[in-house]
Amino acid sequence: MVAQLFLNGLILGSIIALGAIGLSLIYGILKFGHFAHGDLMTLGAYFAFLFKVQLGLPFWLVFVLAAAFTAGIAVLLNIILYRHLKDRDSVIVMISSVGAALIIRNFVLLFWGPQNKFYDKAIQMPIIIGDGLLRIKENQIIILVLALSLVIAVHLFLSKTKLGKAMRAMADNIDLAQITGINTEKVIIWTWAMGGVLTAAAGILLAFDTHLTPVMGWNLLLPLFAAVILGGIGSPYGAMFGGLVIGISQEMSTLIISAAYKPAVAFTIMILMLIIRPSGLMGKKV
Amino acid sequence: MTFAGMFSYLVFFLIFVGIYAIMTLALNIQRGFAGLFNIGIAGFWAVGAYTSAIVTKGASPDHLGGFGLPFILGLLAGGIVASILALLVGIPTIRLREDYLGIATIGIAEIIRLVIKNEAWLTNGVRGVSAIPKPLAGIFGSNYNLFFLLIVAAVIAIFYYLSEKGINSPWGRVLRAIREDEEVVKAAGKNVVRYRMEAFILGAFMMGVGGALYAHFTSFISPEAFRPMQATFLVWIMLIIGGSANNFGSLVGAFLTWGIWTGTEFLTGMLPAAYTTQAAAVRVILIGIFLEVILLSRPQGLFGEKKYSSKKTAADN
């Protein structure tokens, strides 16, 4: 039972981690909480639904196209909205992102309707390991492998490429980064694109594990923010770690409290962190 | 539509405008005057609504009850419980940057929704609380809504007066100074955290009372009865349209926004019944785009910030 919950938590945690990396970098570089991030995740999952189920494309192509389209929308949001608001009070940018979240969610409702959707309706028999100790579906193994590969790719990108290093530098200290001659506008655009790709991947994997609903991403927004705050705003590695901690704690919490209150766990961890160490595990002072 | 029908619709419309105006005045204290970011308005609204419903109803087998308190005490109780909630949310977050408070208020609104949905002994769960008493219901007969509109107007008048009074007092000046430059106020020896907390609690009290009025007017509340994010978002649009830190603007913003929102319902109402889900989605998209356009093109809202100055400096000029 404990091992099973841990495994479920690991799957949820890696999905949260993927979404939280982009959220944390955007938060660190642009200094505002992006409240439409959860709904971008939903959008990515529905783009994949469009390409896979409605157009019948192969899975790898679906993944690439959905990620590219979501990245495009994220960049578009920056160009139309956030770029023009960045010199204003951060509350204005945040409320504008809340508006973007509602607009995206309702576009999803408009085009795909409120009913649950599935990439694949066939029921998978779980693989049973160790005399019923662990049950894992084939899909879930694919999710773990894909999530791990993406995290490694992000790590290589952030540590080896010039653009990746510039992103980290900007999230760390934007003034210092500008002095060193980094083209900040370009880096900001690429950060949105990367955030879009990762959050689309998170959405697709989540829908792959369960199903698609228009509120799937919104329901994960609080865990995403909790992961970002736990890891420290602007720290991509903190966000990965935070995502895993939040995912695992949410699933393991059902040992003690009613499963109905699972979403409250992320909130509680976040509040505790804000009391003990508001800068997060790997972040700077706030 | 007959004249009488139109008049009764107008009264009904104005009651909703009034309830939203209370929320906007409350948010104006938090955001306009103190710079606080609250996107969990629906949480305080729901707490006020449920508290007042439970304390004013007679005994019911479905949920906690049997207190049978008068309407006025119900409103006060709604406000007080919402304030206590604000205090609890504020303690860990109010000393940090405004975005933390924003995230925390979303969280608390979500937790309140979970509690309302799952603790059936308290709230009757998803089935909701019905037959919430309407004050003096037997006396006014078919003109009842007109009487209720007067109650709402009276509450607005009180809150408007207190808000104007507060903001022109030394307390209000310190609040606005904190919003502009926290460090300066700290250097002047003021306890910044306490002032902010007071504004947060005061706003939450007003939201609680507004929620209580909503419960008594509709007479039925449930976790599915209204969409929390939509309600919160509408209040924000009302505030932004009216202009932050402007009480009069808040009232006009509530009126205009609710007018536009209701107008889109008329528009989408012309669609065939098969498209109701789509129609609802289109409404939210339209109002969302409306907000973004306002933010980009007229950030100060219709009225901008009212210039407040003490009588003495006004005389000096």
Image (cartoon, rainbow, N blue to C red):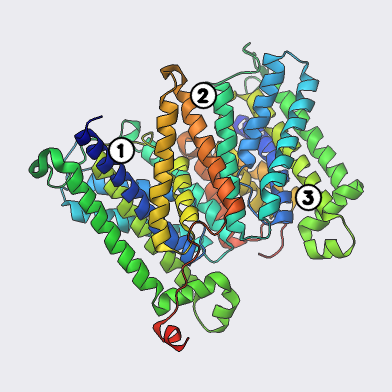
Q: Nearer the viewer, mark 1 or mark 3?
A: 3
Q: Is residue B44 left or right of residue B139?
A: right
Which chain does the residue under circle 3 lie in? Answer: A
State the mark number for residue B7.
none
Q: Quadrant of residue A190?
A: top right
Question: Considering the numbered disc 2 on the image, is that residue within a helix, a strand or a loop?
Answer: loop
Say which mark, if any, is on residue B221: 1
Q: Secondary structure at mark 3?
A: helix
Chain of the residue that carries numbered disc 2 in the rendered image: A
Q: Is residue B84 above or below residue A213?
A: below
Residue at position x 66%, y 47% from top?
Answer: A81
Dot 2 amino acid type: Pro
A94 displayed left or right of A155: left
Q: Position of residue B196 (x, y in %)?
A: 47, 68
Tell which subunit mark 1 falls on: B
State the residue position of label 3. Answer: A188
Residue B61 visible (yes or no): no
